[in-house]
Amino acid sequence: MGKAMSDREALIARLEKLDACAVSDALDAVKLKGAHSGLPRRSTNKRIAGTVMTVKLHNQEPSGGSKRHLGTAAIEAADDKTVIVVEQRTGIDCAGWGGVLANAAKVKGVRGVIMEGPARDIDEYEEIGFPVFSRFTTPHTARGRVWEQSMGDPVVVGDETVYTGDYVIADGSGVCFIPAERADEVISKAEMIAEKERLMTQDVLSGKPVSEVMGTNYEDMLKQK
């Protein structure tokens, strides 16, 4: 267990030094999907990176089962390397995440939330410095409209399945999920791409013609080595 946690922490530390664009390029290079547009950051200017904890919501009221408030189990199971990913694709216009949950998540050390669906209390997230990315925003409450179906089961973001334990990075450009079993490969590729772009930027700033810098080297950057 200690080694697994150490590996996770090391991968997250490397991921934190990258951005979503480098990771998206790396996913392209290894023929993986996982980069998503249309999930803008609604609060803060922070980049987040960590491992996924999933929550799936549905529109059927529980009968006889647990009626715990949506998202609470995920917060309590999370640690300070967790990003909570919520699927609220019921078609009902109501939030899958709100202000009280955000405060509780921040206290627990959760790095942020990604909502496939609507979020509300956006101004409150900004006030407390908690990053939330969401497909939509709404003022409508989840109460009496949607409930938690599961925590820890696969969810769908865009048209891709995301699993608890996958790696994720999200910033002002978008959201990228990396399958846990491919994390080292993708992050290594992203590091190589980021370093090449750093050197290219250095060349441009030193006065090298941009047409030369953005030539064959750039076009070949995503080829497998």
Image: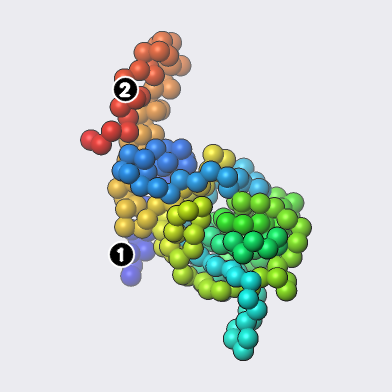
- Residue 176: which numbered mark, if any? none
Secondary element at tag 2: helix
Q: Residue at x 39, y 28 (%)?
A: 197
- Residue 3: which numbered mark, if any? 1
Which sits in the foreground, 167 or 6? 167
Which amino acid does the dot numbered 1 rest on? Lys
> How many labels were placed on the picture?
2
Which amino acid does the dot numbered 2 rest on? Asn
Which sits in the foreground, 224 or 92? 92
Q: Residue at x 70, y 70 (%)?
A: 145
Q: Is residue 191 left or right of residue 161?
A: left
Q: Residues within 10 Å of mark 2 (few under 14, many from 20)?
A: few
Give yes or no for contact between labels 2 and 1 (Cβ–Cβ under 8 Å). no
- Please tell me whether residue 170 is drawn above or below residue 83 in the rendered image: above
Residue 25 rendering spot, x and y as whole percentages: 39, 38
Residue 200 rendering spot, x and y as whole percentages: 39, 22
Q: Residue at x 37, y 55 (%)?
A: 179
Quarter placement of the C terminus: top left
Q: Is residue 21 left or right of residue 134?
A: left
Q: Which residue is mark 2?
A: 217
Give the farthest residue toward the front.
91
